[in-house]
Image (spheres, rainbow, N blue to C red):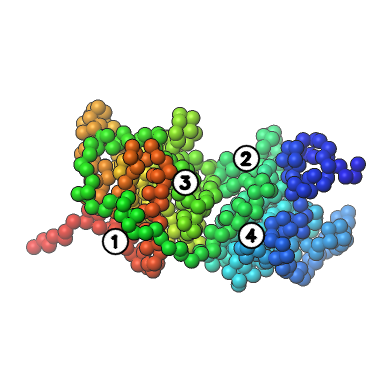
């Protein structure tokens, strides 16, 4: 019977070797069994690539602490039981060929508690990442701070947080892999400070444990409380990945910080075939008809473009504060080998998805998610591509209560000062400030059946004509169609759509977007940071400036 293990997930007896061959995951229900630090390193790192850091020598038993068992004796038992010096193992190595620094916690060692030894090791691996310019991956498993070290343990939260901050300030990517459980001082320091937070399924993450919370508030908590799934829905983590998906996912995420050398852009002739930069080359179409085409739910949405135009894409979720707005999607991807951050508004192709995505109308959490990703792109030196398709920001009472105007304003300020190139493509509706919050860019392109306006034609007609039926006349007066926008200098170019419109051929529409965006990003990357920002400032400073008139 020793070869059989009881799975706590499905309560079935499972052959142990079958679980081991499945990376420590129950083949019946998918329950993820805990791994030792050594097992985790073997699973994650390329074979024979790990170089372990020596254990830190720290003052043990700083308080002379004793409960039922003296603290030194507890340490000795933990070392004998695990074969480890402390509750964390640190190393440098490679993951699918990518060099990185890694720290892996082991819950078997005093519950993975955060004491001086753990804090020192986390700090040392962060400093090594800083010296060798490596991305940093930390795999967490902890019950919290180590009580036997009292205030010294508490100070490790500050010490490790400071170390993570220094790595991030140097423009290096930090990633947390949260495993079950991660609580207390670890959760409230380096585990949740990472740029990208990945969780294994059902992993629990929180400050206070479930039992403490229930006893404090005298309420029964839902079964999924503090699980990865619970936290993803509330915007606290970026993604959930099964153990079999971890290596390829982490490799893609970590590679975003490599800033690989540029590859040749597409031939200029191909760009000329699909990009119009002179208004006279565009027909003077019916503005209202363009509005109707822009709203066609068969047009490709942001996720369609990301799937078809990018080499790869990993979506990052949540504003890390309150929610994960489904109307805004974003994450790390590659475009012809170029790492970049992509952010866009998402609608849908049917009533169910439209409702789920709030009809592409972002909440404040959506704009805060975008702001988080923009800041990350800025630190990592990643160019940004934004795709705009929204009737406008969500106008509901909940949005106002949560600071919709301030969230939009913050994005405008952030985009104006971003030190990396920003290219925007308006793919459908570009509605008011809700669109501009992702459209302040170095280059702004628009598809030939898309629109960009200060207000919807219906809204304008209701206010100025006092008649919603006057929407077609309002559309013409607003000059919201691509030709007018190009004449006004609001957009830099119009991307021609396939015959029948973008909705008729998603693949061709994505290819044309890719053909225009790639060389634009490459060109902008050749500019010095100061030139990039100053040109962006000059671009938006010029709108409506007119001529200076001298008054006698």
Find numbered disc 1 in the image and state the secondary structure of the residue it sits on. helix
- Residue 195 tag number: none
Say whether marks 3 and 1 touch (CB < 8 Å): no
Q: Residue at x 63, y 59 (%)?
A: 96
- Disc 1 or 4, which lies upstream in sequence? 4
The alpha-carbon separation of the residues under discs 1 and 2 comes to 45 Å
The alpha-carbon separation of the residues under discs 3 and 4 comes to 24 Å
Give the residue pinned by disc 1. Answer: 538
Position of 470 relative to 5 (above/below): above
Residue 105 visible somewhere in the drawing? no
Left or right of 528? Residue 460 is left
- Disc 3 or 2, which lies upstream in sequence? 2
Q: Position of residue 80 (x, y in %)?
A: 87, 60
Quadrant the C terminus occupies: bottom left
Q: Sort mark 1 into few (<14), some (14-19) or many (20+) by Cα contacts within 10 Å.
A: few
Q: Quadrant of residue 267?
A: bottom left
Residue 256 visible somewhere in the drawing? yes
Q: Residue at x 60, y 72 (%)?
A: 131
Give the residue pinned by disc 2. Answer: 230
């Amino acid at each position: 019977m020793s070869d059989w293990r009881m799975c706590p997930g499905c309560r079935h007896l499972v052959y142990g070797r079958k679980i081991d061959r499945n990376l420590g995951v129950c083949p019946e229900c998918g329950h993820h069994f805990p791994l030792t630090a050594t097992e985790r390193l073997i699973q994650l790192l390329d074979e024979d690539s790990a170089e372990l850091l020596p254990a830190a020598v720290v003052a043990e038993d700083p308080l002379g602490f004793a409960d039922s068992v003296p603290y030194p004796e507890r340490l000795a038992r933990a070392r004998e039981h695990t074969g480890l010096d402390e509750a964390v193992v640190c190393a440098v190595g490679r993951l699918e060929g990518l060099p990185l620094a890694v720290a892996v916690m082991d819950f078997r060692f005093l519950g993975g508690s955060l004491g001086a030894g753990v804090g020192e090791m986390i700090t040392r691996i962060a400093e090594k990442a800083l010296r060798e310019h490596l991305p940093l991956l930390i795999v967490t498993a902890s019950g919290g701070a180590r009580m036997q070290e009292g205030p010294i343990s508490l100070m490790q939260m500050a010490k490790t947080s400071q170390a993570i901050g220094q790595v991030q300030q140097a423009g290096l990517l930090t990633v947390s892999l949260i495993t079950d459980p991660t609580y207390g001082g670890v959760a409230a320091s380096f585990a949740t400070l990472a740029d990208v937070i990945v969780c294994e399924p059902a992993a629990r993450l929180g400050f206070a444990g479930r039992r403490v919370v229930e006893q404090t508030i005298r309420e029964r908590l839902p079964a999924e409380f503090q699980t990865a799934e619970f936290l993803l829905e509330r915007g606290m983590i970026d993604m959930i990945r099964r153990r079999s998906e971890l290596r390829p996912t982490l490799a893609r995420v970590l590679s975003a910080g490599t800033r690989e050398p540029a590859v040749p852009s597409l031939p200029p002739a191909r760009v000329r075939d699909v990009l119009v930069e002179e208004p006279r080359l565009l027909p003077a179409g019916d503005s209202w008809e363009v509005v109707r085409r822009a709203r066609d739910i068969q047009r490709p949405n942001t996720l369609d473009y990301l799937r078809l135009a990018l080499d790869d894409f990993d979506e990052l979720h949540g504003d890390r504060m309150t929610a994960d707005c489904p109307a805004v999607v974003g994450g790390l991807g590659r475009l012809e080998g170029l790492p970049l951050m992509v952010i866009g508004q998402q609608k849908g192709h049917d009533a169910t998805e439209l409702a789920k995505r709030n009809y592409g109308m972002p909440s404040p959490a959506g704009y805060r998610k975008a702001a988080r990703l923009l800041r990350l792109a800025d630190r990592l030196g990643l160019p940004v591509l934004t795709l705009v398709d929204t009737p406008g920001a969500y106008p509901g009472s909940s949005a106002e209560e949560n600071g919709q105007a301030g969230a939009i304003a913050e994005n405008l300020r952030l985009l104006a000062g971003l030190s990396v190139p920003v290219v925007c493509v308006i793919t459908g509706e570009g509605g008011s400030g809700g669109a501009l919050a992702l459209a302040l860019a170095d280059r702004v392109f628009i598809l030939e059946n898309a629109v960009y306006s200060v207000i919807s034609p219906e809204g304008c007609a209701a206010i100025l004509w006092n008649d919603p039926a006057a929407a077609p006349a309002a559309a013409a007066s607003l000059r919201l169609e691509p030709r007018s926008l190009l004449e006004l200098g609001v957009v830099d170019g119009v991307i021609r759509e396939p015959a029948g419109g973008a909705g008729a051929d998603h693949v061709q529409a994505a290819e044309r977007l890719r053909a225009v965006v790639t060389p634009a990003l490459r060109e902008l990357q050749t500019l010095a940071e100061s030139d990039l920002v100053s040109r962006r400032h000059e671009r938006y400073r010029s709108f409506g400036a007119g001529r200076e008139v001298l008054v006698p």
